[in-house]
Structures are given as C-alpha cells and as structure tokens.
Amino acid sequence: MGVKQGKFFQKHNVSFPLYLDHFQLDHGIESEKILREFFPEVCEEIKGVSDTIGADYSTLASWMLCMGCCMYNLKSNIPVEIRGCTAFAYSKYGRVIYGRNNDLPPYLKDGSKSEIYSPLNGNKFNLTTSSFINGEEGINEHGLTVAMTFVMTGLDKIKAGFNSCFVVRYLLEKADTVASAISLLMELPIASNCNILVADKSGEMAVVECTSSTKKIREAVSCGEDKIVCTVNSFTSDDMKPFDMANGDDCFSNIRYRTVMDNFSNIHGDCIETTQRLLRGDYGFICQYDSPDFETVWSSVFDLKTLMIYRAEGDPRKCKFIEDRRLYRTTV
C-alpha cells in the first residue's frame, strides 16, 4: 500500500515539508518505536512510501508523528499548524448519524483526500485526511466511526506515543465496535492532548478525552430515547480542563460545541439534510470563520447503518454535499 501511495506522489510531483527541529525529530524517533510496537504494519506502509519517493524513513515517520501534536505549538515551525474541528454523533429516529467540519488553513485543502483502505488482515475503511496514512476521521465496514480533535498541549507535557491521527487510523483498522475501540485505545501510549470520538451502528458512542498521562471516557448526553456526543478543540469534562493549554485560543470551541448541543432538537425529519444544515451554520456559529487564513476545508456526514457518506469538499456554505457510495451497503 505504501509503494502504491509513493508512486502516486511521484506521478503528481508531490513533495513534503520535512522541516523538523531537534525537539520534533527526537519526539518522532521515540514515537516511531511505540508505533512499531503496536502497529508494525503501518510502519511498513510508511517505509513503502519513503523508499518509493527517496525520502529518509525516520524523518518522514517523525514528521507524520508530529502532526497535531508538536507542530502547531512551536512558533519556529514552517508551516505553523493550526487545526480546529467540530465532530459529533447522535442517535435519533432509529438512525445513527455522524457529522464533522474539518477546519484548517486553506493551503491544506488541495492535499486533502478521502481514501478506501482494504488491508489483508484488517477492516476495510474510508479514511478522510489532510495528510496520508493517518487521518482525522473515518468509518469502517462494521459501521464504526472514529474521529479526532486536537487540544493544545504544553511542550513539557508531550511524550512519545501515538498522535491523534494515528489513533484514528489504528482503531478504524483494528476495531469493530465502540467497546473494542475503547479497549484498544486504553492500551495506547498517547503523545499529547486530544479528543477521540467513537460511535458504532448500534448507537453506542462516546468521546475519550486523552492526555499523555490520562484518559477519561465522556458518555453521550441522553435526550429521552435519543442521545448525542460532541467534541471540539477543548476538554469538556471539568477534571480534564486543567490540562488544556489553549487559554481560550481554540477557534471558538465553546461556541461551536453549544451550537451543536443546543440545536440537537432541531434535527428532525430528514436527518441527513438537517445535519448538513447544522454543519452549514444554519442554526448558529460553526463554520463561519470568514478568514483568508482559516476555513472549513471539508464537511462530512456518515450514516453508520448504511455506510453512506455525504461530503462537501470545501466550505459547506458554498459546496454541495456529494454522496460517496464506496462503502455503502443496501442491507441494514
């Protein structure tokens, strides 16, 4: 798989900004050892890319392991990494739906992609990513959805381990339910602050709030027979908030969270359409950054029972949601 990806990069003359300082390179090298211990297959995939494009494996793996971990908080990093996202899952009217706005600097839009993976010894899954091999969100053949949002971390709190984007990839490939995903996640060394949302077709869902030293499961909020869980770029649990180093500079996280939670009752009738309207900002602030330097570069809605995906490839206020049927199944 790595060789195939590398040949694609060669064909399209893709290059990578492998600019790492000593902190980042050391972090990446130590984290790769942990990644190889738990997920050796993905290390071989990275090596397939590096061998094909003629890049140094250790540097390429380190760069990927620094994403969403220790790039955005180093002022000297080029380019500076900024990420803000809203992700949620809910069950209503017998359906289980996931929605997300992926908010990034616009220079990352052209490189964003949605890929189907079919590993020989793992689950088939759809991975949506502004990188490659690792990713921000996805859904697998069992109807399990996994998504990440980052939370700012102090440099002194970062440890060697999985970054959130490799957590997403690992759980999509290895787990089939929320229970199995959480069990696997609890065993993983985590590099830095992040939220991991998991939801499955049965309606089970949760967010695991992670630091390099602790993990806390945040259960969904029940509304009668319905329930919803949402994550943004901060910790929601009171006992996890002291670990958040953003000091409020988190892309309006609290406002986005409240837009989702306060408008859950507005999701009615056609769940897909009303979820898309929520992501477009029809019910309040969620994607209306209106900045040349930061925007929603893609927006997704998943139906966990049918595996149907609806994706707007750009600001959802301007771009239509298009069906992606590559995982779709007609029987529920």
Image (spheres, rainbow, N blue to C red):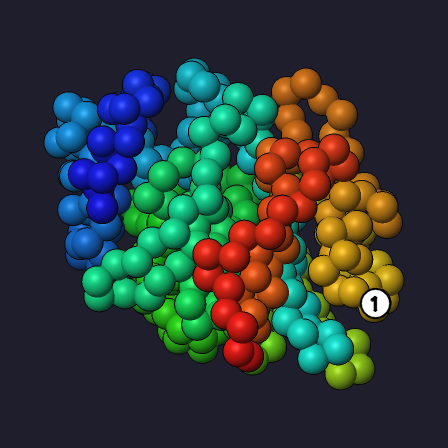
- Residue 248 seen: no
Residue 39 location, x and y as percent?
23, 56
Question: What residue lies at 49% left-to-right and 40% top-to-bottom?
Answer: 153
Answer with left or right where residue 154 lies relative to residue 260.
left
In the image, 315 versus 233, the foreground residue is 315
- Label 1 neighbourhood size at 10 Å, few (<14), some (14-19), many (20+)? few
Answer with left or right where residue 158 lies relative to residue 229.
left
Question: What residue is shown with label 1?
Answer: 268
Residue 203 figure quarter: bottom right
In the image, 140 versus 104, the foreground residue is 140
Residue 18 figure quarter: top left
Q: Is residue 97 above or below residue 281?
A: below
In the rendered image, the quadrant that contains the C terminus is bottom right
Which residue, as the protein is rendered here, is positioned at the far front? 330
Question: What residue lies at 83% left-to-right and 68% top-to-bottom?
Answer: 269
Residue 91 location, x and y as percent?
68, 73
Residue 155 location, x and y as percent?
42, 35
Q: Is residue 219 above or below residue 291?
A: below
User: Element under label 1?
Assistant: loop
- Residue 148 seen: yes
Question: What residue lies at 60% left-to-right and 52% top-to-bottom?
Answer: 323
Residue 104 location, x and y as percent?
58, 32
Question: What residue lies at 63% left-to-right and 47% top-to-bottom?
Answer: 322
Answer with left or right where residue 119 lies relative to residue 168.
left
